Amino acid sequence: MDYRNLRFETRQIHAGLDKNDITGSRGVAIHPTAAYRFKSCDYAAKLFELSAPGNIYTRLQNPTTSAYEERIAALYGGVGAMAVSSGMAGILVVTVSLASAGENIVVSPYLYGGTYNQFRHTLRRLGIEVRIAPSEKPEDFKALVDENTRFIFAETMGNPTCAVPDLEGLAAVAHSNGIPFVADNTFGAGGYLCNPFEWGADIVVDSATKWINGHGNAMGGVIVDSGSFPWDNGLFPQIAGPSDGYHGLNLYDTFGEAAFIMKCRVDGQRDLGTCPSPFDSYLMLLGLETLSLRVRHQVEATRSLAIYLQDHPKVKRVSYVGFDTHPSHENAKKYFRFGASGVLNAELAGDVSSTVKFVEALRLVANMTMIGDSITVVTHPASTTHKQLSETDLAAAGVTPTLLRISLGLEAVEDIIADFEHAFVKAGI
Ligand SMILES: Cc1ncc(COP(=O)(O)O)c(C=O)c1O
């Protein structure tokens, strides 16, 4: 079925459901299998040389995961999607599919800490240079691009700053240099709040662990290919040239607009082993059915909590992208439906020890490093994610001793506000 004419809310439920399943099952079946019996050796040979579609081994594909991938591709309007075991795995597969030792990538300064580490340390040891732009402005990216740059990378809304770059401007810089713009759209919630393909991005990665799953019960990531990038400009011989791993097969000639996502699967997934478990794919499919409903609630709850905290005498500062005081307010209004997401940052009055007391006094809100969960989460970066940083690095990252990152869940926001009020009293701030 062509899902393009259906609305997001319908696609999130129907895309990927197999209407021809002979059991008539309402849900997608979980296929807990590592391998698949081949009808014949001739058929197996065709599968291995990529001249026939079908299942070989679950590291490459699995029917439950394929249904999940079809749903994700339909939600983003991409030509294809590939599911992986985590958001970090997605970023790694995209990177090694596009860049080799001796080449470089140009990235935003506002990145999730894990991505920063992968770029700064692991890729560097693999010989891929990572150039971090001094700001999110397209001209700062442009100044770092040279003939060895293979892609531009930015988060559509940075974790945890909620910085929203000029997505169209970044896509224009990438395209004028013959390279793709890769967007980490984790905060864009599976394409519901933001769809980077509408603004010129060529490839999306999304940590499905967060809003796509929505219940904090599985790890996952997705890579989505817009199908619009012309790979035959001489910079990407691994996609539009003879493939070493497939007897000289040219992926672009063979698979056309789906060449990149095929590259991720037939080389990335095959060689790096980043596949998800079929059970986790099932949990993602289940989570996706309610994605828009959950995210809508979370965006509204975040706005309510931001308003409550903004006027609170025990709060020094609220950083919420939905307020016009946030530096990314205008970009968020342009690129994000509802102009916001489900995350805000707040700096409490008091000091580090009263902030720790506050966090420990919360009864409903969980002290975790997580976002997009059905449980409201508070993270205290100074005592957790950023504990190893020096005072200078903490200041550069904007992490003050009393800063909290808050990701709203699905509870009644009135109960969350009451929990905060109780914790303020207990902490004696
Ligand atoms: C923006 C962003 N990208 C990537 C990741 C990594 O995802 P995962 O934890 O699924 O590996 C995260 C995790 O929080 C994230 O916030």
Image (tube, rainbow, N blue to C red):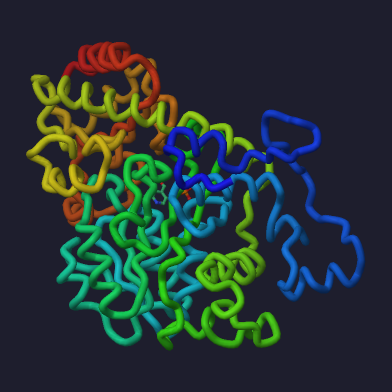
Note whether 400 is above or below 238 in the view shown: above
**Residue sitting at 18 percent across and 16 percent down?**
428
Q: Is residue 25 left or right of residue 130?
A: right
Q: How many marks do you count on the picture?
A: 0
Query: Of 19 and 208, which appears nearest the observer?
Result: 19
Residue 252 coordinates in the image, percent (x, y): 54, 78
Query: Of 53 and 58, which appears nearest the observer?
Result: 53
Note whether 375 is above or below 341 in the view shown: above
Q: Is residue 287 left or right of residue 246?
A: left
Give the quadrant of the C terminus. top left
**Residue sitting at 31 percent across and 62 percent down?**
200
Residue ranking furthest to the right:
40
Residue 417 coordinates in the image, percent (x, y): 26, 15
**Residue sitting at 43 percent across and 44 percent down?**
190
**Residue sitting at 27 percent across and 39 percent down?**
337
Residue 51 coordinates in the image, percent (x, y): 73, 73
